[in-house]
Amino acid sequence: MSELTKYNDYISKPMTNFQTALYSNPMNQLVRDQSKINSNQFIFNHEVTPKFQITDQKSSGRCWLFATLNLVRVVAAQKLQAEPKDLEFSQTYLFFWDKLERYHRSIRYYLSIKKNISREFQDQYLNHLFKDAMGDGGQWDMARDLIIKYGIVPKQEMPDSYHSKSSSLMNSFLLDMLKNDLTILDKSDETVHDELIEVMTDRAFNFLVGFLGQPPKTFDWIYNSKDGIVELTNLTPQSLLALCKFNPDDWVSVVNDPRKENIYNKYYQVQYLGNIKDQHVGWLNLPIDRLKLLTKQSIDQNKPVWFGCNVGAERDRDSGIMDIDIHDYKHIGYNNKMTKEEKLRTFASLPSHAMVIVGYHSDVNNMVKRWKIENSWGKSSGSDGFLLMTDSWYSEYVYQIVIPKSLLTESELKEMESVHKLISPWDPLGTLA
């Protein structure tokens, strides 16, 4: 028994009263530490301006696109002197092109895997592809490439459809159609593959028009500025992007991967992860304190920060507060002792959601205590749609940020010029937000 003494705080203790309460009540409410909520007010002494109304991704996995366009609209409003009330760009527009590009790239990747991956490992790669090739999740690099290629349009030019707000039926149909196309390619001669892929992609386009609407090629745009109403005619998605002065290449993705085999200050890519380019999704791996400093510096420059985190961990749904031990399991006999590295290795914690950091609160010593989060779950979530993340929660559950490239040092930028290692697509950090 002596060997077990160090685990005394882990061994379950009698909890008859708790068992009785648990039978009829949600567990997270029974173990909620109210003091964590009381001590974290939604007050922040550094916030990005202008401030916007919250957005709502509905029953879809488009958080990465919402977070991206919530970042774009802040930059656009600053450059155009636009009033934030009605300024929103179409998430469905980028969603359409992502689905089409993803369909085409999945076909190309399938053929590449069949040709270039040894039979011993093919099944592992193909099982990963078959599982969720047409899902909604995405990464910053994918959003960046979509914007570069297709530009942006106002929300009113391509509003949400039924299937953009509730995407599961559309995704299931597209995945089934994709698998059918892959089977056809298996049975066809390689000399006709290019022609077949073009036909298959065109058909996917036509279905997407039905699901999501026709992407506009030109449009007029009216918005309120500080100097009055501005009316612009015959815009294209690319000309609107140029007008907003948002250059996607000015922003860079940085992660905190604490696993020992993925050393810091190196650039990594996830194999076969992406939507447009043959180049894989990639990022620079840095210590968590460096991520925090970069986040603070970006907000100090009045620029929000796109970030990926494990949003389901230690979050109080009612208040929108995310804090370590906000659910106190210790007093009922359970103590999770896993480190951030161990949680990542076991998939107990991984990046599951993308949002935007729009502010922070620091104390008299300029130490950040909490961060203000703009979510995309509508106003009923958290505090009018905003969440609060404590600095300790940031350390444990934030995995990725997107910040202005200008904030990186010369040596950090130099590391991004070459890939240190390719990561497998089923890696926990390959999870799409």
Image: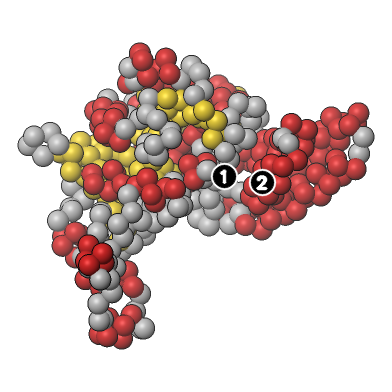
Q: Give percent across and percent down for residue 1.
A: 25, 71
Vertical position of residue 272 compared to residue 393: above or below: above
Q: Is residue 100 visible?
A: no
Question: Of all residues shown, which one is farthest toward the left?
Answer: 364
Element under label 1?
A: loop
Pick whichever of labels 1 and 2 is earlier in the sequence. 2
Tell me, for residue 124, which label it has, or none.
2
Q: Quadrant of residue 333?
A: bottom left
Q: Which residue does the image show at 68% across and 49% down from the upper left?
A: 127
Side of 82 where 191 appears, left or right: right
Amino acid beneath label 2? Gln
In the picture of the structure, the residue carrying the numbered disc 1 is 426
Element under label 2?
A: helix
1 and 2 marks in contact (CB < 8 Å)? yes
Q: Give the number of the mark in front: 1 or 2.
A: 2
Q: Is residue 172 visible?
A: yes
Other residues around mark 2 within 10 Å, as few (<14) / some (14–19) / many (≥20): few
Work out whether residue 313 or residue 162 is closer to the camera in this orientation and state it: 313
Q: Give percent across and percent down for residue 115.
A: 78, 33
Q: Quadrant of residue 181?
A: top right
Q: Give percent across and percent down for residue 278.
A: 65, 27
Q: Which residue does the image show at 46% across and 36% down from the upper left?
A: 68
Tell me, for residue 407, which label it has, or none.
none
Q: Quadrant of residue 116?
A: top right
Vertical position of residue 235 compared to residue 118: above or below: above
Work out whether residue 202 or residue 339 is closer to the camera in this orientation and state it: 339
Q: CA distance from mark 1 to mark 2?
A: 9 Å
Q: Which residue does the image show at 21% across and 71% down from the upper left?
A: 331
